[in-house]
Each structure stands twice: as C-alpha cells, then as structure tokens.
Image (spheres, rainbow, N blue to C red):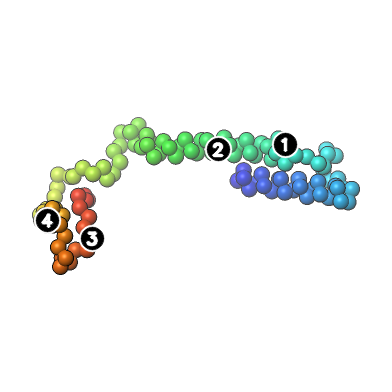
Amino acid sequence: YCLGRGLIEIATNHYRSYAAKEFGICISADGQCDKNGLDWDVAGFLVFHLVIMAFVWFTLRLLIEWRTFSRVCGRRPKGTGEKSGFEDSAVMQEELRVSSEVAAGVKPGSPDRLIISKLSK
C-alpha cells in the first residue's frame, strides 16, 4: 500500500507542478506547487514506512525460514526425515527392492525409469 500510494502522490505532485508551469494555476493548499517528490509531506513518509515494513517483514520471513517459532513453541516441524516406528511390510519390501536396484545399478530393461530412494511417510 505504501508503494502504490507513494507513486500516486508523486504523480499527483508532478501534474500539479506541470499545471502550475503551463497554465499558471496553483491548486495546492499551501501555495507551493513545485515540490520534490520525496519531500516528507509528498511521499517521504510513505517511503519511510515502506523501508520500516520491508525490514520487519524480511526479519519475520527469516525467522520463519529458520523455524524459530517451532523451536520456541516446542513443536517439531513435519518431515524431518526420521522414520516412524510403524512400517508396513509392503513398504519395507519396496524399500529393499529399490535399494538393491540402486546398489546394482538400474538395468536397461527395468520398468523403473526414475528411482527416488529413502523417502518416508
């Protein structure tokens, strides 16, 4: 919102300045029509807020990526790669078949074109 509103304020300021130069009409409340676009009262406060918000959201994003909140709350994230105690017999057989094919190398006549190993539920 800060970026969009800032761009609108800068464009409005530009067209006010253009109207003042071309037609001699100044419609600004304070009588000063030729202002810098990044002055505090034009779009400077919006740029300041944008910088503050970018820093805050970037820091929050880094904390989420580093799983800080899951450590603080005492929860473990899912999919850490550890196997659960319950394994199905079909899963174990398929794991043995895949690991033996990977160790022996994929044969040219094998129906498996792509082998993904060491997956967990």
Q: Nearer the viewer, residue 14 or 52?
A: 14
* Amino acid type shown at disc 4: Ala
- Give the mark nearest the N terminus, 3 or 1: 1
Residue 76 lies, in percent from the top left, at: 29, 38
Q: What residue appears at the point 41 percent right and 36 percent down from the top-left corner?
A: 63
- The residue pinned by badge 3 equals 114
- Give the mark nearest the N terminus, 4 or 1: 1
Question: Is label 1 in a helix, a strand or a loop?
Answer: loop
- The residue pinned by badge 1 equals 39
- The residue pinned by badge 2 equals 53
| Res. 74 in view | yes
* Amino acid type shown at disc 2: Met
- Give the mark nearest the N terminus, 3 or 4: 4
Mark 2 burial class by Cα count in 10 Å: few <14, some 14-19, many 20+:
few
* Cα–Cα span, label 2 and label 4: 55 Å
Position above or below: 98 against 40: below
* Amino acid type shown at disc 3: Leu
* Cα–Cα span, label 2 and label 3: 45 Å
- The residue pinned by badge 4 equals 104
